[in-house]
């Protein structure tokens, strides 16, 4: 019995030989789109990529919708210019406090000495307040905006509070004018400097204690 031819291998249809994929060619990375910086209208800080309506450097309010492809519009009110706003409040409060000091003093003839004394006392009171707040900010509170802006705001708050204290001092009721002026000062610190209630109360009390200690030292040293 002779062996027949070997069986043919079945053909498998539908399969194609593997194709060699071309090796990827090296392509240079796409050029990065360099956009111009978008400065803050208050301090010049670059606001690109920011999504909150407040500058992280100076704390100034800016136009919302800022993935910032376009620069925010210029400020339209004094409240959008914190330095100018605080400076005007400081100047107005300081001049008003000096004028009230002169008008309520017991000096009959106003002279350059009287004006100089009024300016010196009010400037010293503002300096003490600013130094106390600066120490609190360095040790505890921190800086919510630029140092110069914050100190202008602190001085403006205390100058306006001084005007309120002098006017309320005309009320012949013990401790009531002082209490009302402290409440006004706390409200100004919360509004202008953006402090919490607790921070504003502590700062106001610290400034009062430092001022009282300095006046007591001057009285003991030069009067008694």
Image: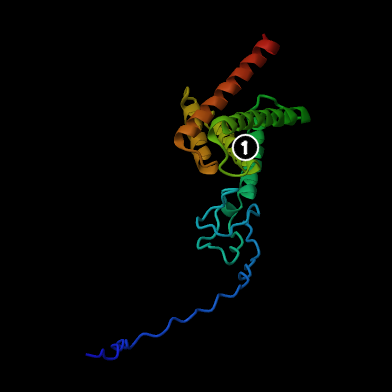
The answer to whether residue 5 is above or below residue 39 is below
* Viewer-closest of 104 and 36: 36
View extreme (left): residue = 1
Can you see residue 110? no
Q: Residue at x 67, y 16 (%)?
A: 218
Name the residue nearer the viewer: 52 or 93.
52
Judge whether 216 appears above or below 146 on screen.
above
Q: Nearer the viewer, residue 106 or 121?
A: 121
What residue do we see at 56% from left, 36% from top?
142
Location of the N terminus by quadrant is bottom left
Q: Residue 76: horizontal and vertical position, in percent? A: 59, 60
Asked if residue 53 can be seen in this view, the reply is: yes
Q: Position of residue 146 (x, y in %)?
A: 62, 44
Q: Quadrant of residue 75?
A: bottom right
Quadrant housing residue 47: bottom right
Q: Residue at x 48, y 31 (%)?
A: 201
The furthest residue to the right: 112
Task: Decide which of 81, 1 is in the foreground and name it.
Answer: 1
Mark 1 residue element: helix
Q: Which residue lies under the disc numbered 1?
A: 155
């Amino acid at each position: 019995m002779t062996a027949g031819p070997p069986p043919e291998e079945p053909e498998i249809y539908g399969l194609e030989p593997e194709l060699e994929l071309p090796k990827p060619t090296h392509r240079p990375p796409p050029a990065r789109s360099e956009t111009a910086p978008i400065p803050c209208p208050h301090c010049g800080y670059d606001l690109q990529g920011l999504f909150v309506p407040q500058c992280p450097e100076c704390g100034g309010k800016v136009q919302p919708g800022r993935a910032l492809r376009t620069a925010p519009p210029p400020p339209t009110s004094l409240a959008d210019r914190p330095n100018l706003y605080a400076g005007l409040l400081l100047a107005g409060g300081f001049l008003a406090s000096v004028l009230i000091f002169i008008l309520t003093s017991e000096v009959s003839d106003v002279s350059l000495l009287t004006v100089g004394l009024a300016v010196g006392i009010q400037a010293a009171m503002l300096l003490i307040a600013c130094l106390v707040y600066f120490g609190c900010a360095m040790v505890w509170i921190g800086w919510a905006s630029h140092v110069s802006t914050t100190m202008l705001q602190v001085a403006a708050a205390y100058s306006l509070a001084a005007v309120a204290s002098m006017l309320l001092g005309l009320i012949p009721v013990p401790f009531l004018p002082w209490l009302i002026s402290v409440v006004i000062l706390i409200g100004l610190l919360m509004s202008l400097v953006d402090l919490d209630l607790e921070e504003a109360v502590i700062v106001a009390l610290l400034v009062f204690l430092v001022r009282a200690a300095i006046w007591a030292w001057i009285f003991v040293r030069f009067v008694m």
